[in-house]
Every structure is written in structure tokens, then in C-alpha cells.
Image (cartoon, rainbow, N blue to C red):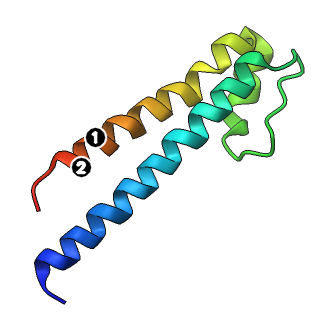
Amino acid sequence: MKASKKKLRNKIINSVGFGLAVVVTYWWAYLLYTGTPSCDAHGIKLAVVIVPICLVLGNKIAATVPFLIGSFAAYMLVSSINEKI
């Protein structure tokens, strides 16, 4: 496989991966923000970090963690699309 085709394939894979990360983390932030005060983690492994924050500071503050992760993934998505092949 040519180097340019390999780079294009990797660029597409990275774009899909970062896009999914954006959708999942923003959805989880929405669930935390609008959720009940029980701080349900919805079975996500990042709950080790989120649940203590949620218990101490509340849902609204805990929702910022997945939102910031999603924002970073969105930045990486845009920067990976803009890089040259």
C-alpha cells in the first residue's frame, strides 16, 4: 500500500474515532447534567473519577469533566482533518 493511501486511511480512522468520542462524551455530560442527584455513572469506566466529584460538588460540576474531554476530542478531530496528507 502506498504511503499516501495509508495516511489517508489513518486520517479517516482517526476522524471516526474522535467523532465517536465527541458524541459519547457529550451525551454522557448531558446525562450527568440533567440526571437525578444519585450520580448514576451509566456503566462508564471513567466513573471512578466522576462519581466522587458528583457526590461532593453535584451533577452540574461533574458534567464538566466529560464535556471537557469531548471538547478536546472535538479539537483533535478538527486538527486531524486539517492536517496535510
Depth check: give the residue in front, 49 or 16. Answer: 16
In-image side of 65 versus 33 (left or right): left
- Residue found 39% across the figure and 34% down from its top: 72
> Mark 1 packing: few (<14 Cα in 10 Å), some, or many (20+)?
some
Residue 60: quarter of image: top right
Residue 39: quarter of image: top right
The correct choice, above or below, for 38 with respect to 56 in the image is below
- Residue found 58% across the figure and 30% down from its top: 66
> Mark 2 packing: few (<14 Cα in 10 Å), some, or many (20+)?
few
Q: Are marks 2 and 1 in contact (CB under 8 Å)?
A: yes
The correct choice, above or below, for 11 with respect to 57 in the image is below
- Residue found 67% across the figure and 24% down from its top: 30
Residue pointed to by mark 2: 81
Figure quadrant of the C terminus: bottom left
- Tag 1 secondary structure: helix
Place of residue 56 in the rendered image (x, y in percent of width and height, measured from the top left): 76, 12
- Residue found 25% across the figure and 49% down from its top: 80
Residue pointed to by mark 1: 78
- Tag 2 secondary structure: helix
Figure quadrant of the N terminus: bottom left
Q: Amino acid at mark 1?
A: Val
Place of residue 32 in the rendered image (x, y in percent of width and height, measured from the top left): 73, 24
Question: How many tags in the picture?
Answer: 2
In-image side of 17 versus 12 (left or right): right
In-image side of 37 versus 18 (left or right): right
Q: Amino acid at mark 2?
A: Ile
The correct choice, above or below, for 6 with respect to 26 in the image is below
What label sits on residue 60 in the rendered view? none
The correct choice, above or below, for 85 with respect to 24 in the image is below
Place of residue 31 in the rendered image (x, y in percent of width and height, measured from the top left): 74, 27
Residue 64: quarter of image: top right
Q: CA distance from mark 2 to mark 1?
A: 5 Å
